[in-house]
Image (cartoon, helix red, strand yellow):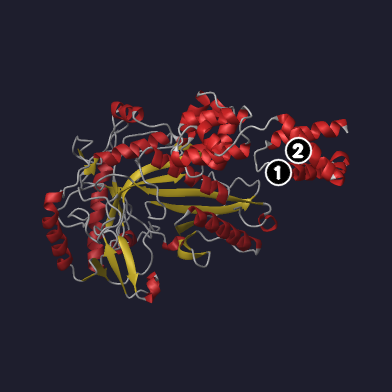
Amino acid sequence: MEPDAGTSTPGRISRDDVAYVARLARLNLTDSELDGFTGQLADVLDHAADIEALDLDGVAPTSHPLPLSNVFRADVPTVGPADEADHRLFCDEVLAAAPAAEESRFRVPPVLGEAP
Amino acid sequence: MTSGTASEMDGWEVVIGLEVHAELATATKLFSGARNEFGGEPNENVDPVSLGLPGSLPVLNEKAVELAIRVGLALNCSVQASEFARKNYFYPDMPKDFQISQFDQPINGEGWLELPDGRRIGIERAHLEEDTGKSTHVGGGGRIHEASYSLVDYNRAGVPLIEIVGKPDLRSGDDARAYVSELRSILVAIGASDGKMEEGSMRVDCNVSVRPVGQDQLGTRCEVKNINSLRSLGRAITYESRRQVDLIASGQEVDQQTRHWNEEDGRTHTLRSKEEAFDYRYFPEPDLVPVAPSAEWIDEIRAAMPLLPGERRHRLAEEACIQPSAAALTVERGLDDLALAAMDLGADPERVLVHVENNLADGQGALTADAFAALVAMETGGDLTATQAKTVLADLVDSGGDPAAVAASHGFEAMDTSELEGLVDGLIAEHPDDWEAFVDGDEGERRKKSGFFVGQIMKATRGQADGRVVNEILERLAADA
C-alpha cells in the first residue's frame, strides 16, 4: 500500500488508498465514485473493528464459512478416449468464441512487460 | 565455474537464494480434469476451469497434494495445514486474471536439503500453485516490448506446480548448480516431477546479492529470471555478481530489481525495478476449502517413499568405507544397487567403484552383480590386469556372459612373474641409459622412466602384462642394482 495521505476519511482508509486499489484492479473511477467508495469501504472496515474489539485469543482466523477441509477430486482425466470428438468440438468452439485466434492459439493485444 | 576472477571478486561474498518451480507429475491439472501433458496441439488440454470461463469452479487434485507432501517430506519440511490464496495480476497467460497459489499458509514449512558434500541448505517453504499458459510474442523478433501481438496456449495453465523457496545459504555458482542438481534428483526419485529444465518442467529463479567478506548484513539483491539450464544458472550468477561488485566498486549502489538472463549475450537485463514491483493483493481463495492432511495420511505417504539420493550415498559410503561425497557419482548413475550387490558377493569396494566411475558411464547394460563380482575377483586375484578387466567389462555390459569365458575368448591369461622378469631383464639390457636414469634419478625422472619401461613391456606383451607387477619387478631390480 502507498502511504496514507489522509485526505477525506480520517482513520481507516484514505481516498488515495482507494484510488491506488482501484488502479491495481484496473478500475476507472470518477471523483464522486472515489468519494462514495471511500466512505463505503470505511464502513466495512469499521465493521471489522467491532470484531477486533472482542477477545479472540485462541480462535483461528476464519477464511471460510464452511466447516470443511480436504475436498478433493481423483487424478483422472475428464476427457476419456470415447469423448475425444466432443472435446475437439469444445476446443474449436472456445477458440471460435474468442475475439481473435491464430494457429489454434488465442490472439491477444501486445503485452508490455514480462509476466511476474 | 566460480564467480569472476579472484582479483575482481576478492574480498566479496556472493549470496544466492533460489526459487525453483517444478511441474508435478499428475495425469490432470491442479483444479480440474483437463490433461497435464507436455507437447501436443495448442489449446488441446483445456476445459472451462483452465480457461477461466464464468461459472467454472476449481476442485483440488488429491494426487497433487500427495506429491506436494512427498516433496515436503523429502526436503525435511514441516507438513502443515494450508490454504489457497488468489494472487491478482493482469496478464493474458492467466485467463482468470489471478493465479491460485498459497500465501501465508503453505503446505510445507521450513526444511533443508543436504548437498553431496554434506552441507545443509535451508528451505524456507514449498507450496502448491497452478502454472500459467504459454505466450508467444509475434513481430519485433519475438521480443516482448516490440511485439505487435501475442498468441496464448492454455495447455499449461492450471498444471500443478510446487514452488520450492530456498534460503540464501548458497555462496557460488557451483553451490547453486549442486543444489538444483540435488533437488532435481530428489524430485525424480520420489516421482514428484520429471525435472526437465529444457522442457520447462523445472524452472529456476535466482536471487543474487554481494557483500564484503565478514559483513553480516545482506546486500541489495536482484532476482534473475529466464534461466533454462544448469549451465545458464552458473553463467548468470557469475555475470550478475560481477555486475554488482563493479557497481559498488565504482561508488554506485545496487538497485533492487528483477532482471532477465539473456542466453545469447550472456548478460542480465533490467526487467523492472522495486518501484514497479507488483502488488498482488493476495486474499484467501473463496472457492477452495483448507487442506489439512491428517497425521495418518502423512505417515502413509512417508512409508511409501523410496530411498532418497542422500540416503543412498550414505548407505554406499558406509559399505565401501568412503566419504558420502565419493559415492555421489555412483548414486547419480543409479548404479549403487549394483555396486552394493557386487560388494555383498565379496568384490573389493575400491575396484568396484573405480569401474563404476570410469567404465560404466552408460549404465550397467547386461552386466549382472554376479558377473561384476566375479570379474573384480579375477582382477584382484591377479588373473586379469586392470586394462584387461576393462575390456572384459565392456563385453559384459554389451552382451552379458561369464567373465572367465569372456576373458578366455580374448586370450587373456595371467602371465607368470618369471616370464615377465625375463622380459624386463632383456629390456634393461637394450636400454642401459634409461635404466641408469631410473636407478639414479630423482622422483620425477624415476616416474618417467618407469612409465617408459612399463609401456615397452605392455607393447611387447600386447597389453597382457600387469603394470603393477612390472613396476614391482623394476623396483626390486633397482634396489639390487
Element marked by disc 2 = helix
Q: Residue at x 41, y 55 (%)?
A: B198
* Residue at the spot of label 1: B460
Residue B10 in the image, given as x and y percentages of width and height: 68, 53
Q: Chain of mark 2?
A: B
- Under mark 2, the amino acid is Leu
Give left or right: position of B431 versus B383. right
In the displayed structure, B293 sits above or below B199; it is above
Quarter location, residue B298:
top left
Is residue B438 in view from this perspective? yes
Is residue B316 in view from this perspective? no
Element marked by disc 1 = helix
Q: Residue at x 77, y 41 (%)?
A: B450
Give left or right: position of B326 versus B79. right
Q: Chain of mark 1?
A: B
* Residue at the spot of label 2: B423
Q: Marks 1 and 2, Cα distance to the nearest angstrom?
A: 8 Å
Q: Residue at x 63, y 57 (%)?
A: B4
Instruction: Tell me whether the residue at label 1 lies in contact with that at label 2, contact meaning CB atoms closer than 8 angstroms.
Output: yes
Callout count: 2
**Do the residues at pointers 1 and 2 share their chain?**
yes
Nearest the viewer among A81 and B35 is: A81
- Under mark 1, the amino acid is Ala
Give left or right: position of B245 versus B417. left
Quarter location, residue B427:
top right
